Image: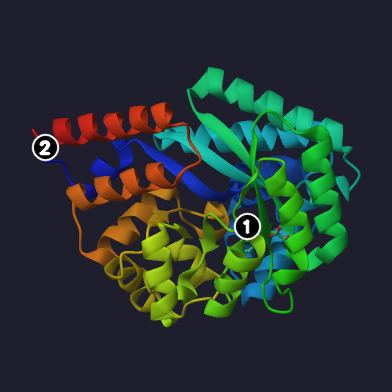
Amino acid sequence: MTDLPTFIAGLPKVELHVHHVGSASPRIVAELAARHEGRSPVPADPEALADYFAFRDFAHFIEVYLSVVDLIRDADDVWLLTHEVARELARQQVRYAELTVTPYSHVHRGIPAPAFCEAIEDARKRAEADFGIALRWCFDIPGEAGLPAAEQTLRIALDERPDGLISFGLGGPEIGVPRPQFKPYFDQARAAGLRSVPHAGETTGPETIWDALRELGAERIGHGISAALDPELMTHLAERRIPLEVCPTSNVRTRAVASLDEHPLPQLIEAGVPVSINSDDPPMFGTTLNDEYAVAARLLGIGPEGVAALARDAVAAAFLAPAEAARISAEIDAYQASAAR
Ligand SMILES: O=c1[nH]cnc2c1ncn2[C@@H]1O[C@H](CO)[C@@H](O)[C@H]1O
């Protein structure tokens, strides 16, 4: 049996909770910063960038995140970012990824919605041809921008409707951004066939998750880690098979959780809550999806068998067609069998 990091590196995976801009690697950020020389607080030097991605608290994280969003100024920047994010995911043997994109933030900075959607779609198709990875989009509302952003995100989703668009989300801070106010927008998105995947229970308690389920029709929950504080909620998630998109290192780096040893992932798994392991904003958190599987393995005390099971659980939680999900699961089975020899 190969060692666990090597096993994880070769394991076919899917990723369900990873942000477009949040995945801009130091190299891409440096390239974008150089393109718009001097008009950004974001350091172009990868070393200095590592220090720049050290967050005092969640609000500071959002502030830094938005400063990277400011680097993306035109459709070419969007294309470059998207194609490079796909390259990095494929390098980690990701076969399928649901990438969270925040169109409002880019349109708000002057990139027309049609040009933005054309750029992500073209990069998505090129990535499939170049790297063999299937990308789909979650369009999320930046919660800090409130109802005007909800309105525009819904408009872009319904008017542009890029082929890769499959879900509708809500990101940004939860504190001061109650979920029920977004119900009209999620109702319309779901009526149009988009799947509901809001963030909830990352920086606030279980009641935010209950709101996301009851008011926004959430089919999966972004993060959702505070469910561990509410046994009734964990039972509900387990019985209804509503998956949480857990991003362990993100929660520590944004200070949502004090340390990995205090991360509630083991309690969630113990309660039978469906969980997928994800990286969220990998370069910002100094991690990768492979690293997150290694963190989960350590927290759960599992080896290759358990890690392969986590990968299958993510496939089961994905908005994949059954045949495609079966194909990726079979690839995981074959890989696990060959690694065991
Ligand atoms: O871990 C996270 N939690 C919440 N929002 C996040 C996270 N990572 C990235 N964003 C993104 O930050 C944007 C700010 O406008 C939000 O749109 C959200 O998508």
Marks 1 and 2, Cα distance to the nearest angstrom? Answer: 40 Å
Looking at mark 2, is its residue's CB closer than 8 Å to ligand 1?
Answer: no
Residue 259 numbered mark, or none: none
Q: Position of residue 144 (x, y in %)?
A: 77, 67
The quadrant of the picture showing ligand 1 is: bottom right
Q: Quadrant of the N terminus?
A: top left
The number of discs equals 2
The residue at the point 74 percent across, 42 percent down is 32
Residue 49 numbered mark, or none: 1
Q: Are marks 1 and 2 in contact (CB under 8 Å)?
A: no
For marks 1 and 2, give the one nearer the viewer.
2
Element type where label 2 sits in the image: helix
The residue at the point 62 percent across, 72 percent down is 211
Q: Is residue 143 above or below residue 281?
A: below
- Under mark 1, the amino acid is Leu
- Under mark 2, the amino acid is Ala
The residue at the point 56 percent across, 71 percent down is 209
The residue at the point 58 percent across, 76 percent down is 203
Residue 340 numbered mark, or none: 2
In the figure, is residue 272 to the left or right of 118?
left
In the figure, is residue 84 to the left or right of 35?
left
148 or 279, which is in the foreground?
A: 148
Residue 186: image quadrant is: bottom right
| Residue 68 appears in view | no
Dot placed on the residue nearer the N-terminal end, 1 or 2:
1
For label 1, count other residues whose C-alpha is less than 10 Å away and answer few (under 14), some (14-19) or many (20+). some
Residue 214: image quadrant is: bottom right
Q: Position of residue 34 (x, y in %)?
A: 76, 42
